[in-house]
Amino acid sequence: MREGAAPKSKRPTRLIFVGALSFVVALGAFAPASLMAPLINASGANIQYQEITGTIWNGAFRGVSTGEVLLGDIDFTIRPAALLTGRASAGFTIQDGAALGSGRINLHLLSQSVSISDTSVAFDLSAVRRYSLFGIPYQGRIEARDANISWSRNGCVNAAGDIRTDVLDSSSKTLVGESLLLAGPAECESGQMHVTLRGANSQGRTEIKIAIDQELTYRVMASVDLGRADLENNLRRLGFEDGDGVLVYDVVGALKGAGS
């Protein structure tokens, strides 16, 4: 560098970057959300919808369903600034269907993972008509409160949250005249997501463990300790078997969607 020569300014480069980013944000402000349709349709997910309204940054999916289950209307707002950190981040609310709640979903482009954060959602289990739980039609609802879950190609990376359900409450009241509510945490272990739900009343206790691996294969393991021969015989007729001092139920399947 010659003596007295001034260093080249980075200002033009910064202006070009800011201008390009402003153009992308402005373009998205007017681009219709329907531009997302080809990506969603090509994803292979078991998701259907009636229409997409609004813009790419602020829009809604109307009449979202999976299989035979109507989930509801999903409104979303995307944060353009999150793209600068290598992720796409969208806040959402869902209502007018089997699901009700709100949260945030994040797509991490560099790590190729997806996560949900600050999410609280309730789901009406009676909307699932094709399957049953221990031979009993699904009823009641299940809630996830303050859920934070990260999922990559290798499976579950991190999970936290409080899961609650009254899926067995009606059956318990019919059988023993008492309520039975189940609750427990969501956790990650060796790439699998684990949910352990426990509940008890004066007639016995119940524990249900759910594990989901990176291939979306699930395993449900239930144990029931009643201490009453008449009730235990009823459970054996539903598929429970004798375990280590308790009755156990174990089933494995593929997670394809609530209605698939």
Image (tube, rainbow, N blue to C red):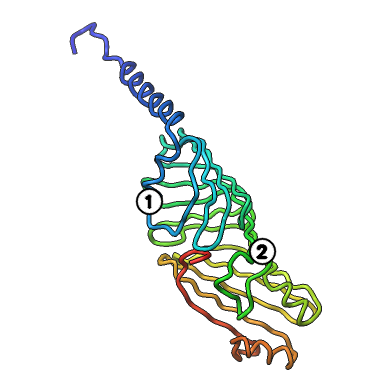
* Residue, disc 2: 141
Give the left or right position of residue 118, taking residue 6 as reference. right
Residue 118, position in %: x, y?
A: 59, 48
* Residue, disc 1: 112
Q: Is residue 52 above or below residue 216?
A: above
**Badge 1: how crowded within 10 Å, few (<14), some, or many (20+)?**
few
Q: Is residue 258 above or below residue 118?
A: below
Residue 71, position in %: x, y?
A: 57, 55
The residue that appears at 45% across and 51% down in the rendered structure is 114
- Which of the 4 image quadrants contains residue 121? bottom right
Q: Earlier in the sequence, mark 2 or mark 1?
A: 1
**Badge 2: how crowded within 10 Å, few (<14), some, or many (20+)?**
some
Residue 109, position in %: x, y?
A: 38, 45
Q: 215 or 140, which is in the foreground? A: 140
Q: 88 or 1, which is in the foreground? A: 88
The residue that appears at 26% across and 9% down in the rendered structure is 6
The amino acid type found where label 1 is placed reads Gln
